[in-house]
Amino acid sequence: MVDVLPRVPTGRLVVLGEPGAGKTMLMVRLVLDLLARRPSGGPVPILTSVASWNPADQDLTGWLAAQLIIDHPALAAGPPPGRKEWTQAAALMAAGLVLPVLDGLDEIPEDVRGSAISRINDMLQPGERVVATCRSQQYWDVVRPRSGVEVTLRAAAAVELRPLDAETVRSYLCDDAGGPAARARWEPVLTALGTEAPAGLALSTPLMVGLARSIYNPRPGEPIRELRDPAELCNPHLADQAAVESLLFDAFIPAAYRHERPGRWTAQEIDTWLVFLARHLETTIDGPDLAWWQLPIALPAIRNHATAEADAVATLAAATEAGMPATVTIRGSLLATLLGEPEAPETRSAASPMATLGRARRAAIVVGVPIAVVFGIVTGVAIGAFTGYASGVGRPVAPAIALGVAVMVTTGTTIGFLSSQWPWYGIARIWLALHQQLPWRLMSFLADAHRRGVLRQAGAVYQFRHIELQHRLATRPANSYMVPEAPGSGPAA
């Protein structure tokens, strides 16, 4: 793809494909290759999911600048001399030093998808490049709608990812099988590849082939008899492609955790937690980004009164770390405004969920507490002095000073804590753990899910491995764990 892009005179490209066709991973490869070939002073390719962008209310330039600050907090600092923008991120955008790689136009709501493409056109200046991905049908529905105004990404070429050929799938599954006995188990499935059979249609995308490999191929030292049989994909009860894909999605989670050490987490707990997170993203966040600072919105008392969008909370968190004054309107909660001056961002630390959580925690403790203490001492002394002189003693009264210091330090610390994001995350985590909706060590669980391939990391947030996996988990009833099995096959092995 890095060789294809320069062949487009405008440098503007749309990559189309079916769900699971590999659009996101292709963009990851493209960004890495572009960075390797980037000339000095050239624009930096930035891969970002546009699912959380609301084109009806936000221009793309401002939204991208906010995303840059979330993933790279140092860019919230002031711009270079002579620039009129507020932040370095905004200055980079205005100077054309960012090459946007926009993943997932299809994840933007249908009624504003056309507006999103128009916003992209408005942002681009002559000579500026952009790459965007979208599911094929969703893109054509915007470009050539049955009714309404046609809209297309101006001066952009388009390429479409094709289904995998049967030989590629056969080699991938068999080479990884680890021996003749394991390879032989694939024979019923291999005969269906490249045909119109449900299993053949399902196993034509990298996503589904990858899931099948994880589910049915043994890992080193793992007995084959303990695994599900891939022949179940050819079960006649699986009437169509969607049924086969649903089986693969349902079987993937147990397969990803089948070597969990005893006593750590039960299979039912894992299922319950993942279902809750998927439903949180589907119904509360309305997007794929699992951000720790948005967890308080999952609490009923806060969720019922929240009016700010999720991306406003994300922008607030980024501004908090960078020391920028910012507010967000959330009725009925103490998340309404920031106090104090958080510490300077760590410019060398990687953008990751753990790194951003650590910075927020240090900002609340290392900076917020000393400010509250100083404020409390000064105020307490003033109260004691006023009390002494007002009562005719003629000097500060020690008990009044002590009481004033204690009250004001406590008040200042409480306000400072509840005005930052980290304490609210802690409150939400404890509340949800007590109600058995999430584990006590949430970040450790998420990092483990990332290592197992259930989640992927996108800068400071996690996402499910694929949006369809999120959709599938979200539709499963909460607290109703069931080991999936092929229809008509009896209990799963």
Image (tube, rainbow, N blue to C red):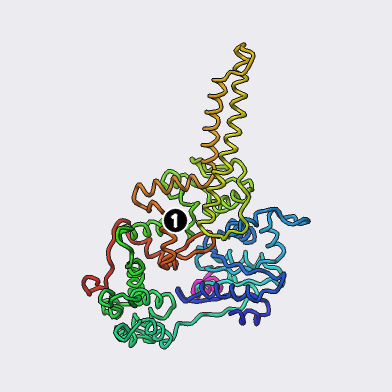
Reply above or below: 256 against 81: below
Neighbor class of circle 1 (other Cα within 10 Å; few <14, some 14-19, many 20+) is some
Q: Residue at x 40, y 78 (%)?
A: 209
Q: Position of residue 230 (x, y in %)?
A: 30, 79
Please tell me which residue lies in front, 334 or 360.
360
Q: Which region is colored magenta?
A: 136-148
Q: Position of residue 157 (x, y in %)?
A: 61, 78
Q: Is residue 42 left or right of residue 265?
A: right
Residue identifier under label 1: 443
Q: Is residue 300 left or right of residue 140?
A: left
Please tell me which residue lies in front, 127 or 479.
479
User: Is 144 part of what is drawn in magenta?
Assistant: yes
Q: Residue at x 55, y 64 (%)?
A: 50
What type is the residue that disc 1 sits on?
Answer: Met
User: Is 302 part of what is drawn in magenta?
Assistant: no
Reply above or below: 189 against 251: below
- The quadrant in which residue 176 appears is bottom left
Which secondary structure dominates the residues rendered in magenta?
A: helix
Please tell me which residue lies in front, 81 or 259.
259
- Furthest residue toward right: 82
